Each structure stands twice: as structure tokens, then as C-alpha cells.
Amino acid sequence: MPENRRAVDVLNKDDLILITGAGGFIAGSLTRYFRDQGFTRIRAVDKKPLGEWYQRIEGVESLSMDLSERDNCYRAAEGAVEVYNLAADMGGMGFIENFRVECLRSILINTHMLEAAYQAGAGRYLFSSSACAYNIQLQQDPKVRALKETDAYPAFPERGYGWEKLVSEIFCQEYWAERGLKTFIPRFHNVFGPHGTWDGGREKAPAALCRKVIAAKDAGEHRIEIWGDGSQTRSFMYIDDCLMGMDQIMHCDDLLATPINLGSSELISINDLVSMIEKIAGVELERRYKLDAPRGVAGRNSDNTMIKRILGWEPSIPLEVGMESTYAWIESQYQDRKAGKKTIS
């Protein structure tokens, strides 16, 4: 079996770790992950005002800066030993399909952050890519073949967000090839869990459906609107698996400048996901399908052959287990909002 290394195995506890996008879901959770392991110098950066961050972690240097601006990237990278770049304008399909320019502009973040990390002498740099980089012609059937890393070419990614990810991957590869900056490129497949966006237009399917079920149950209406016809299939990765995967990928030199899937291989249709949430909630709802709503590709799943071969590991937390904790957290957020308390949007 491979000897997997993590940050705790290779870094000193006072080495500076930079995490961008830390006001959001995944990067905020990553900040807590490293803080819980005893790292004492973490710099967290996000363009949102500090009061709007999803998680503020005690003892972390938290900075509100727009990293699409070059000078801010240089400030953020000062002294960093490792850089985790998760900053991007993104959301669920409703956001990705309707705000392509904002998604494309995220290429400025990675372009400036790479150069800033290189100039700062950082040892390792992780770029959070996405399964949206894959050729959409391979995702036209709900019974989709699981996507392998090589399926990104010939290139035909999702417009806007997918192209930004694919081009940014190339930047990472060239910084390793030409300048020797160790870069790592996990392609995320639909990450979900507590402390994520659950309302407002940027939320992804698991959170959006939980909110809709909770709202229907609360109102006693027993109806739910589903985008598309419900036949779309996806795999969804629980946040704890994502954090562990990033840590291992970042510290595996066999994966230098090599895009790799980081996702669950547990495929489910949207209709079946709704049924799972109904079971958790203890309700049955009438389903109304909004066929003209953004729905994304017909099917997408993660082929985990490569990550199992190289790391001897893959995301394995069952979807229903993750959905139970996610539903409970969103329900508490819903009730807090109803009571007039501040919540994550």
C-alpha cells in the first residue's frame, strides 16, 4: 500500500499555510481542518467582508481581499510554505449557467496567485479544479460512464466555469514544468455538507433540495419543485472526504501537476436524492418539474481508478450518512432564520 503523507507529516506546526476562498464552504472547512490539527500560522483570505464569512476560525489570520487583483495576491502569499487556492466565483448550476463572465474572471485569481506563490518561494500549491472541466459530450446520458482524468481532452468543457478550470490547470502544469513550483490539481465532484451555501442562488443540489423539503414540511404544503425532469445523475462527495483527499493529494509527489478526480463514485439520480431526503425528513412530497430550469449535463460520475492506484484511498463516506448531517444542519439554519437570527445564506 502507498505510504500517504499529509501536512502533519511534512510541515512544522508554525509553517504558514495560505487558504484562499476561506470565507466560503470548502476552504472555510479546510481552515478548520488544519487548525484542529494544531497548525498555528494559517492565513485565510476571501473577498467577502469578514462578517459574511461562513466560518471564522479562532487564531487564524483572516483577511478580506479581492484576489483577482495582483497586489492582493502578493500580500496574501508573503511567507507562505503551502498555498491552497480555492477562491473562485461559483455556485450551483443556476449560477454557473447564468453568470459565465463572473466564472471566467476567476482565471485572474489563479494566474496572479501562482506567480505570487512562486515569487514567495512557496513549496507547494494546490488549485481546486472541477469535474466541469470534462468534455460535456461524454455526459449526455444519465447512465453515464464514470469520467476518467483523460476524458478532459479533446476539450469541450462547460462554458464559462469549465473553461476557466481547464485553462487554470494548464497554468499549474506549466509552472511546475518551467519554474519548478510543485502544483497539485484535484478535480472536485459536487462537494456538500454542513456550513455550505443553502439558499440564495449559489447552492448546489443537495443543499437546495434539503431546503425545499424543509420549507415544504414547515409550510405543510407537501410540494417540491425540481429543476429538470429528475433523471439527471451525479455523485456527491461529503466535505470530510474532500478535506482528507486534498491533504493527501497535496503531499503526494506522484501527482505533481497531474489532474486527478476527487469525488465519490456513488451515482444517484436527482429523483432518488429527493427520495433519500424525504426519508430523512419523514415526509412524502408531490413533485413538480421545472423543465426550463438550468440542469447541467445529463450525467456525471467519478472514475476513482487513478486515486485508488496512487493513494490506495478514495472518498467513501456514504451519501445517506452525509445527507443526514447536512439536512440536520440546514434545518437548524432554517429555524434560526425563521427566528430572526443571522445565518449562512
Image: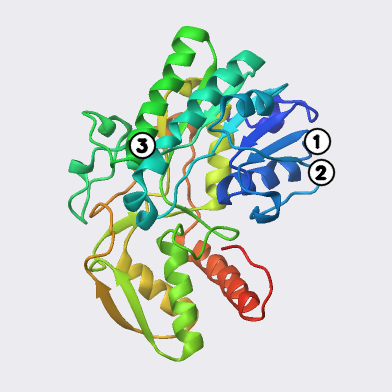
The answer to whether residue 112 is visible is yes
Q: Residues within 10 Å of mark 3 (few under 14, many from 20)?
A: some
Residue underneath mark 3: 305
Label 3 or label 1, whichever comes before in sequence order:
1
- Compared across the picture, whether 139 is left or right of 273 comes to left
Label 2 or label 1, whichever comes before in sequence order:
1
Residue underneath mark 1: 40
- Vertical arrangement, residue 274 with respect to residue 61, above or below: below
Residue 153 placement (x, y as % from top left) = 24, 29
Is the Cβ of the residue at disc 2 closer than 8 Å to that at disc 1? yes
> Mark 3 belongs to which amino acid?
Thr
- Compared across the picture, whether 275 is left or right of 151 comes to right
- Vertical arrangement, residue 128 with respect to residue 167, above or below: below
> Mark 2 belongs to which amino acid?
Gly
SS at badge 3: helix
The quadrant in which residue 51 appears is bottom right
Instruction: Give the Cα distance between marks 3 and 1.
Output: 36 Å
Label 2 or label 3, whichever comes before in sequence order:
2
Q: Residue most toward the top?
A: 178
Residue underneath mark 2: 59
Residue 285 placement (x, y as % from top left) = 36, 84
